[in-house]
Image (cartoon, rainbow, N blue to C red):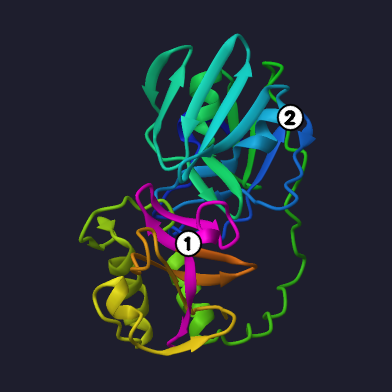
Amino acid sequence: MSSTILLSSLFPSPSAHAATYNYDVRVQVDDKLIAFPDAQPFIDENQNTMVPIRFISEELGYKISSDMNGQQVKVTIEGSGKSVIFLSGSSEAVVNSQKTNFGTKAVFAEGRVYVPLRFISELFGIRIQWDNKNFNAIINKDGNYHEPAWYRPTAMTPAPAPAPAPALSIGEKIVQDAKKYVGTAYLWGGTTPNGFDCSGFLKYVYSPNEVSLPRTSAQMATVGTWASSPNTGDLVFFSETGSRISHVGIYIGNNSFISATNSGVKIDSLGSSYWGPRYVGTKRVV
């Protein structure tokens, strides 16, 4: 008997699996396993299977394009007689000029836009199986059921305990904690996961790591030490209105930073056309 189940039971039971971002999820279209070269599927804290939409759309033969719309990414997908348009940070899509809500916000992270896998099923009418044994989502493009293209190895003997992971630096721990809140909504004056503004987000993330920061971005610029180039966990400051500091984020490496913007908590490039000209400098507080 097949170990696959339908989309209505797509997600593992929360009682059996604690919510985490570390599941080793695989996705296949018919009999072909999809390769994700730089952005991997994951299961979020609400048990949604989140997938990079570009790779899925291309494998299904749909035409997909994306471009920046302010501080959000606008994505357009055309296929199966439908035109679908949506923005990162939003749970709404426009399908053939009709607005619909797919329940979970599209997320822009690590340079890719993620959507819940049920987005594909509901908007394009494609059945999806879930192989619970191998943690494999199977998209039935041809309308037929398919066996898993990958099987999780079964160990004959208990695997040796893994070597302990290297201890994270305080800066790396701060970045790891900050990334948990990608997609959280913006709220002026917000200081909790119910909604953040830029300085409230940093104060919330740094505090459990025993780094006390002032309340506003301008006040944060008065602490720490100015650095010629940023390290992981440093504060990066921007001026969007003349010479006054008006925005602050956390440097995460690879010339990128995370911050609470008007479109929610997201990752941006220091060299982007918007943030590059507004970058003021870096302060080291860890």
Of badges 2 and 1, the one in the foreground is 1
The secondary element bearing badge 2 is classed as helix
Image quadrant of residue 120? Answer: top right
Image quadrant of residue 214? Answer: bottom left
Which residue position is annotated with label 2? Answer: 59
> Would residue 270 be counted in the magenta stretch?
yes
Relative image position of residue 158 (x, y in whole percent): 71, 73
> Would residue 56 be counted in the magenta stretch?
no
* Lower sequence index among marks 2 and 1: 2
Q: Is residue 269 above or below residue 252?
A: above
What is the three-letter code of the residue carrying label 2?
A: Glu
* Residue drawn at point x = 30 percent, y = 82 percent: 213
Left or right for 263, reference 139: left
Quadrant, the C terminus:
bottom left
Q: Residues within 10 Å of mark 2 (few under 14, many from 20)?
A: some
Which of the two residues, 30 or 14, is positioned nearer the viewer here? 30
Q: Residues within 10 Å of mark 1 (few under 14, many from 20)?
A: many
Cα distance in 3D space between marks 2 and 1? 38 Å
Q: Which mark is residue 48?
A: none
Which of the two residues, 23 or 250, is positioned nearer the viewer here? 250
Segment colored magenta: 259-286
* Residue drawn at point x = 73 percent, y = 29 percent: 59
Which residue position is annotated with label 1? Answer: 278
Relative image position of residue 104 (x, y in whole percent): 40, 39
Relative image position of residue 124 (x, y in whole percent): 56, 18
Quadrant, the N terminus:
top right
The secondary element bearing badge 1 is classed as helix
Relative image position of residue 85 (x, y in whole percent): 50, 25
What is the three-letter code of the residue carrying label 1?
A: Arg
